[in-house]
C-alpha cells in the first residue's frame, strides 16, 4: 500500500488505483486514464474519498484508496 499526494504525480504507466469500500469490501480498480477522468489529475486521496460512492452498497465517503 502506497500513500500518495495526488494522482498525476504518483500514477505511472500501468499503475492502478484501488478503491475499497470499508463497509462491504467491494473493490474497484481504475487505471490512470479512468482515475483522472473521474477525479481530476490533481485529486488527492482525501478528494477521492469524499467523492467516491460505492457501486455495490451505495455508501459514500467510507473507502480506502491506494495504488
Ligand atoms: Zn460498499
Image (spheres, rainbow, N blue to C red):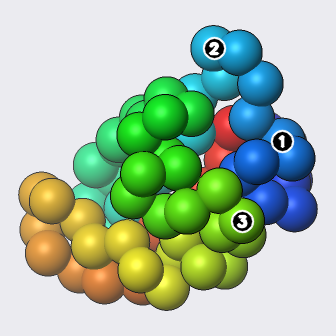
Q: Which residue is mark 3?
A: 42
Quarter that holds the C terminus:
top right
Percent across and percent down for residue 41 are: 65, 56
Q: Which residue is mark 1?
A: 10
Q: Say whether disc 3 or disc 2 marks the residue closer to the N-terminus.
A: 2
Q: Residue at x 76, y 48 (%)?
A: 8
Q: Which residue is mark 2?
A: 14
Query: SS of the residue at dot 3?
Result: loop
Q: Quadrant of residue 44?
A: bottom right
Q: Quadrant of residue 17?
A: top right
Say if disc 3 is inside 8 Å of ligand 1.
Answer: no
* Residue 30 appears left or right of 48: left
Distance (Cα) linking label 3 and label 2: 18 Å
Query: SS of the residue at dot 1?
Result: helix
Residue 45 seen by the camera: no
The single residue placed furthest to the top in the displayed view is 14
Q: Residue at x 34, y 52 (%)?
A: 25
Q: Nearer the viewer, residue 11 or 49?
A: 11
Percent across and percent down for residue 7 are: 71, 51
- Is the residue marked by circle 3 packed among few (<14), some (14-19), or many (20+) residues within 10 Å? few
Residue 7 seen by the camera: yes
Q: Residue at x 74, y 35 (%)?
A: 11
* Residue 63 appears left or right of 24: right
Quarter that holds the N terminus:
top right
Percent across and percent down for residue 6 are: 78, 60
Q: Nearer the viewer, mark 3 or mark 1?
A: 3
Distance (Cα) linking label 2 and label 1: 11 Å
Q: Residue at x 14, y 75 (%)?
A: 58
Vertical side of 24 occupied by 25: above or below? above
Distance (Cα) linking label 3 and label 1: 10 Å
Q: Quadrant of residue 61?
A: bottom left
- Is the residue marked by circle 2 packed among few (<14), some (14-19), or many (20+) residues within 10 Å? few
Amino acid at each position: 500500500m502506497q500513500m500518495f499526494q495526488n494522482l498525476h504525480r504518483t500514477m505511472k504507466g500501468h499503475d492502478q488505483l484501488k478503491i475499497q469500500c470499508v463497509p462491504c469490501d467491494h473493490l474497484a480498480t481504475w487505471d490512470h486514464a479512468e482515475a483522472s477522468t473521474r477525479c481530476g489529475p490533481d485529486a488527492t486521496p482525501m478528494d477521492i474519498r469524499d467523492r467516491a460512492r460505492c457501486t455495490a452498497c451505495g455508501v459514500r465517503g467510507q473507502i480506502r484508496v491506494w495504488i
